[in-house]
Image (tube, grey):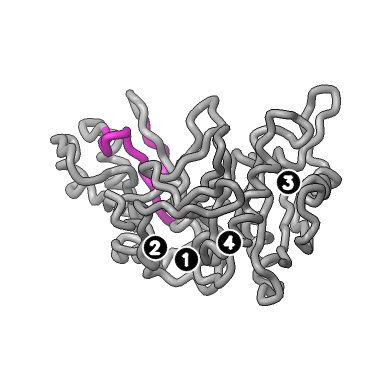
Amino acid sequence: MKILVVFTGGTIACSSDFGILHTDTHNSFLLLDMYSKADNSVIFVTETPYMILSENLDSSNLFALYNCIKNLDLSDFDGVIVTHGTDTLQYTSAFLGYAFSSLQIPLVLVSANFPLSDSRSNGLINFSSAVDFIKCGGGRGVFVSYNNKSDFTEIHRATRLLPHAPYSDYLTSIFNINYGIVENHKLIKNSAYAEKPDKLSFDEINFDGLSVLKISPYPDMKYPTLNSGIKAVLLETYHSGTLNTKNNSLKEFCGLAKELNIPVFLTGNCDGFNYESKLLFDSFDIKILPVASPIAMYIKLLTLPKNRINDVFLSCGGDFSENLS
C-alpha cells in the first residue's frame, strides 16, 4: 500500500509556544510517526506545497495545491491524503472535489480539531480512518474523513460539506447524508447516499482574477456596491430559502448587477415553503441554484471563467442536485 500525503498546515500541523498556536513542519511528520506505531505496512510519500494556518487560505494556495497533485504520477499510488486546517476545509475540499472529480483513486482530506499533542485531538483518528478508507477501496474521487467525537469516523463527499456552526468543530454534510462511515477499520456505505456525475468539465483550473461576491442576509441589510472585478454574485438565504424582498436595497442591487452584466445566483432554496417573499426572485433576475452546499457553489463559480458562469445555472441536475431533496 502506497499513499501520497500532501501537507498544507492547519491545526493538525500546529505546535503551541506560550499558548500561541503556529504551524510546524515537524508535526506533519509526527502524524506519520504516530500512525506507523500502529501500522508500518503503508509506504507514505510526502509533498508540502505550502504550510499555512487555513484561515489565511486564498486562491493562490488552491492553485498551488492543484498543481502539486496534478503534476505527480498518481498511477503509482493507491490513494492521496491532504492534511488541512478546519477553518477553510470545506472550501478546499469542494475545490479539489471539482478539480479531481474524475480521479480513479480516492483523495481524502483530513484535519484536526486540536493539535496532535492535545489528548482531545481527532487528527490521528481522522488520518487513520482515511488510510482505512483507501485500503477498503471505498470510492473514487475526493472525500473528507472526520470524527465527531464518536465510535466511528464519517466519510463525506468533498463537495457536500456545510460550514461549521459557530463555536463547534463538528463537521456535517448537507441533510446529514454522508458517504459512509469507517468503523473497526471497515467502510460501511450509507444506503441513503446518491449522486449524479457533474455535467460541467473542470479539465483545467484557471483563476481569471475576477471575484465572486458572497453575501449572507441579516435584518436591515444594506447591499454593497458592484464593480467590473466581480464576475458573479452568490446570495445566501435564511434557513427557509428566503430573503427580504421588500428591501429596496436588494432591488437596486440586482438592477445594477443586470446593468453591469453580473449574474446573481441564490443558494439555500429548496422545494416547499413557498413564502410570498420568494415570488419576487424572478422579477429581480435572481437565478435559483439547485440544492447544494453553499460553499461548493461559491467554489464552482470562483473556478469557472466568466464566459461559463451561466453554465452553473443551465446545468441543473449535475453533482449539486444529487436527488437529495
Where 12 sits versus 41, above or below? above
Magenta part mainly helix, strand or loop? Answer: loop
Which stretch did the figure color magenta? 222-243
Residue type, mark 2 in image:
Ile
In percent of the image, x 49 and y 62: which residue is there?
A: 98
Q: Secondary structure at mark 2?
A: helix
Dot placed on the residue nearer the N-terminal end, 1 or 4: 4
Q: Please check the rendered image and state whether residue 224 is part of the magenta-colored stretch, yes or no.
A: yes
Q: Nearer the viewer, residue 298 or 260?
A: 298
For disc 1, the neighbor class at 10 Å (few under 14, some 14 to 19, many from 20) is: some
Q: Would you name the residue on which mark 1 appears? A: 305
Mark 1 touching mark 2, by CB under 8 A?
Answer: yes
Give the alpha-carbon distance from disc 3 to disc 1, as whole Å: 29 Å
Q: Pick the quarter of the image with the N terminus.
A: bottom right
Give the alpha-carbon distance from disc 3 to disc 4, as whole Å: 27 Å
Residue type, mark 1 in image:
Pro
Mark 1 touching mark 4, by CB under 8 A?
Answer: no
Mark 3 vs mark 2, foreground winner is 3
Q: Would you name the residue on which mark 3 appears? A: 9
Q: Secondary structure at mark 4?
A: loop
Q: Nearer the viewer, residue 224 or 75?
A: 75
Give the alpha-carbon distance from disc 3 to disc 2, as whole Å: 31 Å
Give the alpha-carbon distance from disc 1 to disc 4, as whole Å: 37 Å
Q: Would you name the residue on which mark 4 appears? A: 136
